[in-house]
Amino acid sequence: MLLQRIFRAVIMGPPGSGKGTVSGRIVKSFGLMHLSSGDLLRANIKAKTELGLLMKSCIDQGQLVPDDVISRLILTEMRNIDQSSWLLDGFPRTVSQAESLDNVYSVDTVINLDVPYQTIKQRLTSRWLHLPSGRVYNIDFNPPKIAGLDDVTGEPLIQRHDDTPETVTRRLKAYENQTQPVLEYYRCRRKPEPYKLSKKRNVLSLLTAFIFSKLKYLHMLYEHNM
Ligand code: G5P
Ligand code: MG
């Protein structure tokens, strides 16, 4: 199903909650562009760009890269998909990043994957990745057709350096301290429904609200007099 208008969404969740896996399915079904901040950083590391070399140790240690670096990287990349519907995976990850995004684009939907940490730790130790495409596999959940090889290209799969148990624990801590507040940020920004109504409908809804308020007032008076 292709969307009729530009639709902009963000997918959030702790490390290993399935953001990449679920994104893959959503973008296939709805024809969105998928932009993953982690995939973009790993591509820079693989290509040995200056940014990649600078950020590698940060990522390998399970720490977030600085806000200004990742915001500039993602927002520059987003110019290429400006006229498409998109799904952002892994960005924003701090309130400051969410504000940078808000300054340029308005987000229609935020999807949050809520998965227990114990499940995450099990999933990450059995995850395999096709680095060039970002395709994700799991020995138990969705194994590749041929062990160790990507289904589409036949190229070798790798395990991520930051999937060791100690680094996963650090990444979960970073999620709790720096990313969970972003969920609260989006919850507080939720707009009330009536603003989406057309002008004609707005008049109707105002009239309906007025009539209901009067009825409620009469009802209160009635109760008071009882
Ligand atoms: P990333 O690359 O954004 P994380 O830590 O947010 O990394 P990650 O590890 O990529 O997230 P995911 O995408 O949420 O996990 O999960 P996934 O890969 O799809 O699934 C995990 C495993 O579970 C897979 O093996 C999959 O097959 C399996 N699985 C999925 N769904 C299910 C299911 O329903 N059932 C079962 N049984 N299994 C399932 O970021 C990496 C680093 O880059 C930097 C940071 O250093 C970060 O640590 N970075 C940023 N830094 C600052 N700001 C940002 N915005 C940054 N973005 C990245
Ligand atoms: Mg991912």
Image: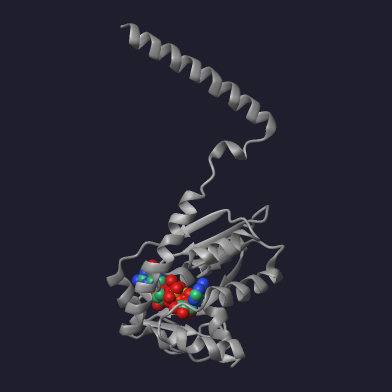
Q: Quadrant of residue 52?
A: bottom right
Which residue is depicted at the point 50% across and 70% down?
Answer: 90
Residue 37: where, in percent of width, then height? 54, 75
Q: Quadrant of residue 84?
A: bottom right
Camera-nearest residue between 100 and 141: 100
Q: Quadrant of the C terminus?
A: top left
Whether residue 173 is visible here, answered yes or no, is yes
Camera-nearest residue between 27 and 44: 44
Which residue is depicted at the point 43% across and 55% down?
Answer: 184
Whether residue 220 sits left or right of residue 22 in the image: it is left
Whether residue 167 sits left or right of residue 96 in the image: it is left
Residue 61: where, in percent of width, then height? 40, 85
Using the image, determine if residue 70 lies above or below residue 6: below
Farthest residue to the left: give it. Answer: 118
Using the image, determine if residue 150 lies above or below residue 32: below
Using the image, determine if residue 103 lies above or below residue 206: below
Whether residue 153 is visible here, answered yes or no, is no
Picture mark count: 0
Using the image, determine if residue 224 lies above or below residue 38: above
